[in-house]
Amino acid sequence: MACSGDTPELREGSLEQWKAAWENGKAVWQVHHVNVALKRNIHRLKIENSGDPKILLPLCGKTRDIKWLWEQGFTVVGVEVSEIAIKDFFAENDIKYEVSQIKGCPGVLYRSTDDRILLRVSSNTSGTEEHSQLFLNQKGGNNFVAYHDINHTRYKYASAISELMSDNCKMLLETLEKNIDVDPGQPPFDFQEPEMRQHFNQQFELEQIDQIKIDEYIDPSDERYFAYTRVSGSRIYLITKTSV
């Protein structure tokens, strides 16, 4: 895993809030099941003759998607601000791991002993450029709804992600449909298709492939359902980088 590129980090306030949520047991965005959009659309990420399929989860937390993707045969690369979340993931799933430093890169790397789960403690995605398939995880890593677009942060983030993607690389992007009575200055932040197309230009094919209502995403009886009442559902897009 090499380290290169300049990717935008979470703003300092957001970074500290994110860490504090994990430290205080208030990471309410973590759900107790595999992401619905991922399960319904994982076949869309398949690339013929891709060899060892790799997938990137920015701001992965301890999402159950990691283990599920690992069980589907993927090598999973995660980037997470909170070391607590990464330690919890390995402990709760009883997966053996090793810890190491990456020369020239910020953060610490937690690697499963079979080398197919690599979770890095960091606030940016540099060092992941060789991974050929990409999934931006809902709330555990969909940075486009986590970032408020101050100082063109989304544009910088989209540029960094674009550089990580090789030709024919596929990204599954889930963006939330926010309820109209929710304060627009509060997360999750809207990320509409016209803005999406500005960030992913002529080098990319963009197609909406699914739509999910909130009750499909999380059971109303789930204790964390209240955290999702700001949204009515989500839209799922397949973004493919084409040859130029």
Image (tube, rainbow, N blue to C red):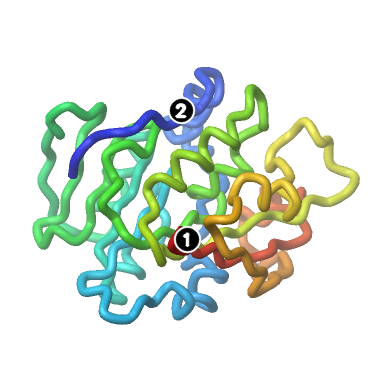
Is label 2 or label 1 in front? 1
Q: Where does label 1 land, which residue?
A: 241
Q: Which mark is residue 55?
A: none
Image quarter hosting the N terminus:
top left
Question: Is 184 placed left or right of 27 in the picture?
Answer: right
Q: How many marks?
A: 2
- Determine whether the residue tagged by mark 1 lies in a helix, strand or loop: strand
For the point 9% across and 57% down, the residue is 113
- The residue furthest front is 244
Residue 73 image-quadrant placement: bottom left
In front of the other: 237 or 89: 237
Query: Which residue corresponds to the image point at 78% horizontal and 59% vertical from the top-left?
Result: 232
Disc with the residue nearer the chain's start (2 vs 1): 2
Q: Which mark is residue 9?
A: 2
Q: Tell me if mark 1 has few (under 14), some (14-19) or many (20+) residues whose alpha carbon lies within 10 angstroms of its own.
A: many
Query: Residue 191: x, y in percent?
Result: 70, 47
Q: Nearer the viewer, residue 96 or 35?
A: 35
Q: Which of 31 and 130 lies nearest the eye of the viewer?
A: 130
Residue 92 at x, y = what percent? 29, 56
What is the three-letter code of the residue carrying label 1?
Answer: Lys
Residue ID at (36%, 54%): 56
Farthest residue, direction right: 181
Q: Residue furthest top?
A: 12
Asked if 228 appears above or below 122 in the picture, the reply is below
Q: Is residue 61 left or right of residue 159?
A: left
What is the spatial separation of the Cα atoms under label 2 and label 1, in whole angstroms?
A: 23 Å
Could you say where residue 44 lies in the image, as x and y percent from the top left? 48, 77
Amino acid beneath label 2: Glu
